[in-house]
Amino acid sequence: MSLLSALSIVCGLMLHVCFSSLHTHYCAPRKTVPYQIDDLKSFREDGIFNYSTMLIRDDLGVLLLGAREAIYALDVNNISEKKSAVYWRVTEEKQRECTYKGKHAEVECRNYIRTLHSVNDTTVYVCGTNAFSPTCDYMTFANGQLMLKGKQEEGKGKCPFDPFQRYSSLMVGNDLYSATSINFLGSEPVILRSSNLALRSEFKSSWLSEPNFVYMDFVDESTASVDGDDDKVYLFFSENAMEYDFYSKVAVSRVARVCKGDMGGQRTLQRKWTTFLKARLDCSFPEPSLPPIVQDVFLMKHADWGKSVFYAVFTPQSGLSQVSAVCAYSVSAIRDIFNEGKFKTPVAVETSYVKWVMHTGEVPVPRPGACINNVARNMGINRSLELPDKTLQFIRDRPLMDEAVRPLTGKPLLVESGALLTRIVVDSVLALDGQRHDVMFIGTENGYIQKAVNYDGEMLIIEEIQVYENPEPISILRLSSKKSQGQLYVGSEFGAIQMPVSNCSRYQSCVDCILSRDPYCAWDLSTTQCSSIYSLTPSSNTALQSLKEGNVSQCPLPPDRVAAVDVALVPGNNIKLPCQLHSNLAHVRWRFSDKALESNDKYYIYSGGLLILNASELDAGLYVCDSVEQINSRTYNRTVAVYHLQLHSEPEVVTPTPSITVTKYFESIHTLNTAATEPAPGTGDEDPLSPETQSTVGRIGRLEVAVALLALLSLSLIGVIIWFWSRGHWKCLKFAQSSKDSESRNPSADYMHIQNRSSEIHFLGPESRIPCTGNNNHTAVDFKGNGEHHFTPMANISSLDGLGYIHDESEI
Ligand SMILES: *[C@@H]1O[C@H](CO)[C@@H](O)[C@H](O)[C@H]1NC(C)=O
Ligand SMILES: *[C@@H]1O[C@H](CO)[C@@H](O)[C@H](O)[C@H]1NC(C)=O
Ligand SMILES: *[C@@H]1O[C@H](CO)[C@@H](O)[C@H](O)[C@H]1NC(C)=O
Ligand SMILES: *[C@@H]1O[C@H](CO)[C@@H](O)[C@H](O)[C@H]1NC(C)=O
Ligand SMILES: *[C@@H]1O[C@H](CO)[C@@H](O)[C@H](O)[C@H]1NC(C)=O
């Protein structure tokens, strides 16, 4: 059986690889900025871990950072400057109690700070897990000092017991809204409002079924409301689905909301929410799959609340897939579903089985789940306490809406394969064209921040910046756009990082600056620098930006001609000509005496340059490396490197090259020259894959090792597939073959590991990464949950999703 499951997993993996390489255009970052310690301000303290709670207090000039048993006040402009710290350790007694209950002393029985909320100008509310005994306290920051007040309060329901459990909370006025588990075992979920009139959710699986709470935010919907509506708190989470006909657990993503003015019912739903409504969030992945899981959300607020947008990050439910997506939902679309949509209702089928279908009967008035609005007031109902039992009983039993919330654009804004996405924040930038652009900053599970923007449906990942040296998941992301220069604060288990929202000086020429299409950056004609739009003098009218088109025609001078670099040609040797492109989305084009070169048994073109195998006199001449980048429908060609290959057989032919300008692209050319002209001692001939060459060009060498490993892996996979096929699973082979085809089309090892993106393996021909088009014409299979649509039978799901279930065991 274990062999069978291993095989089915392999089969699933294979399908996944094929799908990714054949069917979908995933987005890829245009530029990769590797870890540079000097560019980042960081904070960590020895012996302290789990830096995952943050509160930005611009008014106090501090970032409050909660970690395990410690809270810091850091300078908001430079988080490396610690202004003050307090330590809140568990008592020995608490730790002992906790270990008695079977928890790990050093891991679970510690105090993880999970909550930091502003109460007023000087006071902050803090909660920690406190060795599985959640506790809250007040903390002040005055005269540069943090101080815990020591007024400890019960934290049950406000903060999780379990430090590993996701949860969410929000302070609205003096009321704390929290969504977490209220018991030690973590089995009783609750949505709680701690206030003069405390309210909570009903403990029923139709309300919450093993939920994972992710995010909460407040929308002031009473503002300018024509129907006298109330303000609302929105909550995002995932939970076990109840709407699918399915024999095992499937999780779905949800948005729920409650009204701020809710006071509970008089008899029915006493001290419970009368306005709790939830709906499924739809975000269809390009590949048929189980519903994706919401991981983080950010509310991009707009002065007119109806135009506010929730941005949400989704990852697959099955651990085998490495695809993530961002979907955006307008507040008004969610509101429409809650205010006007149909409800789902449970119907008993057979004896103990309940099926949720669309409710077609009468709906009582006032509408169940609605806030107290003009309709209710006109009926003389001013408070939820006065709602009729019929309305309350209806909503108590039917909190789920029939319809799912559709994303703004009908599909994901962004679909990516590779390291999973973990967190998101969004900034709104007023660009030079007078338009506002929403810029997403997305954290990944391997320590990168991606910066992405949508230009009229075209999705562009401007760059990805490695902020942690080791690939660790980003567990918190905060944005401060109050300062003229926006700052991002990032947290992980091992430390906090601060970085600016942009570093325009990374783009050194006008063409670079314009092609980056970064809304924060513009080419300043007066200083001839790529500068932040916030640092441009408002009076000056001399900055260039072309975000949607990436039009470089306004750039003052044609790009400098690239000087040719002389390279000696020794017949019989292999020669490497490096060429590093500015953009991951560009592909390389090599020309020799103005003839285009292709990979064949003579030339080997890879992402780092060109390899000429077994050079002869005929290979002397001019080699040009062009970068070709497609932006919208325009193609940009740029010459990146030029080499002049000269015969080196007679010593006098070797000419000194006084006129060479060695730009930064050619830094390694001298060592390469040596490697090419002096064959490794003893071997006589030079193998491009030999360890000697690898050490000169370490990075390329690593790529090739990865290639070899991959080749090995695919060989064994094919072996497995053939075995599998002989057992009748032709489908699997079909896909495996298409991937084999793509290998044989690109002889030698044309697929490699890209840069530092550890979990990403691409099949690359000459063009490596494909920019996303915005209309990924994917064959999306929508996951409907409208009652009438039944769950896709297991057999289909498994063969497509790569879950690799075996449907008929007798077959094998
Ligand atoms: C911005 O980028 C430049 C060029 O890579 C680098 O020298 C500089 O340190 C960076 N600055 C910040 C604040 O990241
Ligand atoms: C930030 O603070 C650290 C520690 O005090 C200091 O070494 C560093 O120079 C500061 N960085 C900046 C940019 O001010
Ligand atoms: C802030 O809130 C705390 C706790 O509720 C209270 O003790 C304190 O007096 C308040 N301070 C101000 C300045 O309002
Ligand atoms: C806290 O950090 C430590 C050290 O990396 C890690 O082992 C542990 O799992 C983390 N705990 C939580 C609750 O994330
Ligand atoms: C509801 O409020 C209105 C206006 O404030 C008041 O006239 C009416 O008597 C109230 N109704 C009840 C049942 O309290």
Image (tube, grey):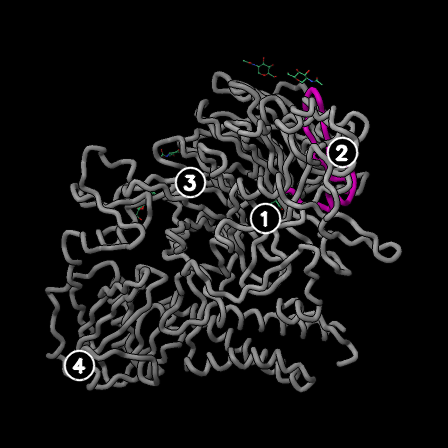
**In the rendered image, which quarter contains the N terminus?**
bottom right
Image quadrant, ligand 1 = top left
User: For this view, does 513 lie left or right of residue 75?
Assistant: left
Query: Which dot, 2 or 4, sits closer to the camera?
Result: 2
Say which element carries label 2: helix
Along the line of sight, the residue nearer the viewer: 720 or 684: 720
Query: Which dot, 1 or 3, sits closer to the camera?
Result: 1
CA–CA distance between discs 1 and 2?
24 Å
| Image position, residue 706 (x, y; %) | 47, 70
Say which element carries label 3: strand
Q: Residue at x 61, y 21 (%)?
A: 174
Marker count (numbered): 4
* Residues shaded magenta: 187-213
Give the mark nearest the N terminus, 4 or 3.
Answer: 3
Q: Residue at x 17, y 71 (%)?
A: 566
Q: Residues within 10 Å of mark 3 (few under 14, many from 20)?
A: many
Residue bearing mark 4:
647
Residue bearing mark 3:
427
Residue bearing mark 2:
392
| Image position, residue 112 (x, y; %) | 64, 35
Mark 3–mark 2 CB contact (< 8 Å):
no
| Image position, residue 400 (x, y; %) | 70, 45
What number is the disc on residue 405?
Answer: 1
Along the line of sight, the residue nearer the viewer: 668 or 474: 474
Query: Which dot, 4 or 1, sits closer to the camera?
Result: 1
Give the mark nearest the N terminus, 1 or 3.
Answer: 1
